[in-house]
Image (cartoon, helix red, strand yellow):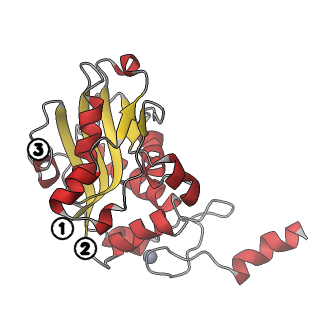
Amino acid sequence: MNILRRYLSPVLFPARCAGCGQVIEPPMPETPVPSVCQDCVRALERTEQFSLRGNLTEDLFATNHQFERAATFCFYDKHDLVSHLIQNAKYGRQPEINYELARLAALDGLQSDFFDDISVIIPVPLHPRRYRQRGYNQSDYIARGLSDVLNIPVDTTHITRIRNNPQQALTRGKERERNVEGVFDVNHPEEMYRRHILIVDDVITTGSTIRSCMKTISAFRGARISVFALAKAR
Ligand SMILES: [Zn+2]
């Protein structure tokens, strides 16, 4: 029965691209089928920010004194391909999309000095209650995708989310900024002494969540902070 299922299920339920829906064949027999097809990978609108200091993403954090550099991989707009992929990763139980996009981003980033001297990758944590509802943190998959290419460890224990703020998408401007105040806390800050931390998130709109995270990280003495996100609102 298992053998039958193994050979029949790809025929009956072929893997489809999470971006455009076309059937994807595995690159080689017995290898895992990617979530995103090569046509969609080529269609991603990359920001080319990795080697661009003073880019649009860095502008958002320029006033933070611990801040080193920031970049996003792609631009997104309402209803476009990137937004569709990110939504599927977050709400559609397909977080492996983020893993694949992060791997592509890491390969791009390696062409620059962006990831040089980063000592640890920290995905923006979800509140435990939201984590249980969703079953995963979509940003963990981004961290793992980067980590597998860059050989930089991922840490998910030193920053925690202590307040389950309302969905950012439902709030605006100043309210958004207040909404994320005091949302994060740190554990064993002494273990992060003078580390260079890469904070990782799926999307950046106003940057308020990451700014709040940075404020919390100021408890890590001598730590430096860089930021990476898969997508930035255009
Ligand atoms: Zn596709």
Mark found first going from the N terminus, 2 or 1: 2
* CA neighbours of label 2 inside 10 A, class few (<14), some (14 to 19), many (20+): few
| For residue 47, side relative to residue 134 (left or right) | left
Q: Earlier in the sequence, mark 2 or mark 3?
A: 3
Name the side, left or right, on which 183 lies relative to 17.
left
Counting from the top left corner in percent of width and height, residue 15 is at: 61, 74
Amino acid found under the numbered disc labelled 2: Asp
Q: Earlier in the sequence, mark 3 or mark 1?
A: 3
Image quadrant where one finds the C terminus: bottom left
The answer to which of 128 and 107 lies nearer the viewer is: 128
**Mark 2 — residue?**
77
Residue type highlighted by circle 1 = Arg
Q: Residue at x 44, y 58 (%)?
A: 98
Label 2: which secondary element: loop
**Res 111 visible:** no
Which residue type does callout 3 highlight? Arg
Who's the residue at 29% across and 33% down the image?
216
Residue that appears at 50% across and 55% down: 130
Give the numbered dot on residue 53. 3
- Checking the image for residue 234, the label placed there is 1
Picture layout, residue 156 above or below residue 89: above
Query: Can the viewer see residue 204?
Result: yes
| Crowd tier of the residue under label 1, counting other residues whose Cα lies within 10 Å: few below 14, some 14–19, many 20 or above | few
Binning the other alpha carbons within 10 Å of mark 3 as few (below 14), some (14 to 19) or many (20 upward) gives some
Q: Nearer the viewer, mark 3 or mark 1?
A: 1
Residue 200 horizontal/vertical position (percent): 35, 45
Name the secondary structure under disc 1: loop
> Which residue is pictured at 47% across the width and 69% down the height?
88
Q: Quadrant of ligand 1?
A: bottom left
Residue 197 screen position, x and y as percent: 31, 32
Q: CA distance from mark 2 to mark 3?
A: 23 Å
* Viewer-proximal residue among 234 and 65: 65
